[in-house]
Amino acid sequence: MARKILVDEEMDQTNKEEAHYDFDLFVIGAGSGGVRAARFSANFGAKVGICELPFHPISSEVIGGVGGTCVIRGCVPKKILVYGATFGGELEDARNYGWELNEKLDFNWKKLLHKKTDEIIRLNGIYKRLLSNAGVKLFEGEGKIVGPNEVELTQLDGTKLSYSAKHILIATGSRAHRPLIPGQELGITSDEALSLEDLPKRAVVFGGGYIAVEFASIWRGLGADVNLFFRRELPLRGFDDEMRAVVARNLEARGVNLHAQTNLTELVKTDNGIKVITDHGEEFIADVVLFATGRLPNSKRLNLEAVGVELDNTGAVKVDEYSRTNIPKAITCDHLNNQFFLMKLHVLPFFLGKCFQKTVFGGESSKADYSNIPCAVFSIPPLSVVGLSEEQAIEQANSDVLVFTSTFNPMKNTISGRQEKTVMKLVVDQETDKVLGASMCGPDSPEIMQGIAVALKCGATKAQFDCTVGIHPSAAEEFVTMRSVSRRITVSRKSKTNP
């Protein structure tokens, strides 16, 4: 009886403590991850509040919008521009398929820009309705943490409101980084690149990551003269080296001028445009200069250090395997954490938001599994990968690595006459026959790679790929018909230390 009374008293105390909070969960940042975590936490019965800056296509410290980077100024508008840029080549190729087109193809940039803006406004509204339908309270304004369980919200008119929450989720994402060179204010970031009033005739892109490669493809596809500068020998550092070379060849074949191992050192405004000076002493004139040199965590105005949340030297939040900060019972981090910035992928906010709501409110401990996450670079044509690159496989394997490749002219190109190969690759552990990684550069590669990712997540072997019937005629069937080993890499067995 005494034990029952003690338990009842403890439960009563817990209920009183929970009733003390204004919200079970307060989310700072209504991007992809924040919205997902908020909605599904509310579906579990939690009382949820979320705040986001006012909507604008170009973000700053005081403007943003529900939907975040991906929806408003990232993946979605970028993909719309990629579609637009792809049509130029498609229309040219159509001539050999019997389509009689005028010699001159006209393109209306402002019409595409208007359609893009309409779509992100529509999606912004959908995200707001999703929150409302889930019972989440949306606040428009800037949020910061003023205590382990307290958020301060500054509204548009300057009014400050304070709310307590049992759990606080940080989901404020990142912002494009500008290199510190003279004249850097003359350049733009991907935010502005998605909302340019006029299509540039001469564009310079500085950077070697997926954003740089994608915008180089977009602007070249829309007719601009494009120079792409990057510090490495090849663009897309971190991807499979063989596939990086394929992307570089495709960029050049489509007319992008590549400048490897080159830095920009200064931008100068002139009457004829922006003069771009490199570390090799070269000079170029451009209408627009895009800095695509990485992104930094959007953490500066959150007051995190003042309340004791630990950050790394980039400003990303240090978290454990469950995305919890060093104040684990109060403050959790979604896609502002250091592991997310290591991965640099768009899709992770959804994934991390799901893990959060299942762990905190679903009664199911769920931590992120960062293995075999597929991703795509929406160059023209696109590159998509899942699992380990050849270089990573060699570094991690305990047995020989088998590499299977297929390079072919897509059936569509045999009629159009376009000289552009599709390249596919499988990396296999020789001892276990397990497929460690897959890559493809060619039309529809992201659509194909999503299915391959399921196979790798299930631990598929090369034998299982081989006994799968291919869809003919399709490019995808090449993944199940690669029989000959392109190369075998002998890996010395790693020494094992005694326990």
Image (cartoon, rainbow, N blue to C red):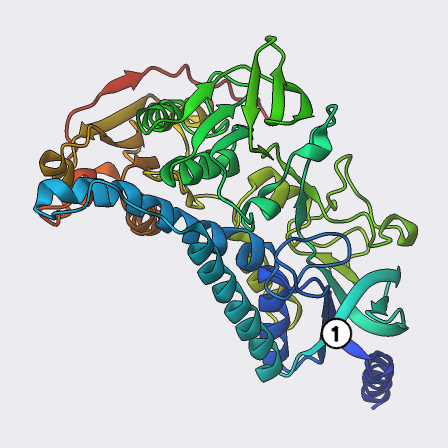
Viewer-closest of 6 and 51: 51
10 w.r.t. 454: above or below: below
Which residue sits at x=27%, y=34%? 433
Instruction: Give the residue drawn at x 33%, y 23%.
Output: 249
**For numbered disc 1, what is the local secondary structure?**
strand
Residue 416 visible at all: yes
The spot of residue 317 in percent (x, y) is 74, 46
Q: Which residue is mark 1?
A: 139
Total marks placed: 1
- Please state the horizontal and vertical placement of residue 63, each as a whole percent of the image: 72, 59
Where is residue 257 drawn, in percent x and y?
Answer: 42, 22
The foreground one among 202 and 373 is: 202
In this view, 221 is above or below 15: above
Q: On screen, 335 above or below 280?
A: below
Q: Whole-percent x and y of residue 86?
A: 32, 45
| Location of residue 365 with respect to 387 vertically, above or below | below
Residue farthest to the top, as pictured:
280
Residue at horizontal 20%, vertical 23%?
485
Q: Residue furthest front?
A: 271
Q: Quadrant of residue 125?
A: bottom right
* Quarter holding residue 41: bottom right
Q: Quadrant of residue 410?
A: top left
Q: Residue at x 32, y 38 (%)?
A: 381
Q: Is residue 366 visible?
A: no
478 left or right of 499 in image: left
Answer left or right for 482 relative to 292: left
Pick the quarter of the image with the N terminus: bottom right
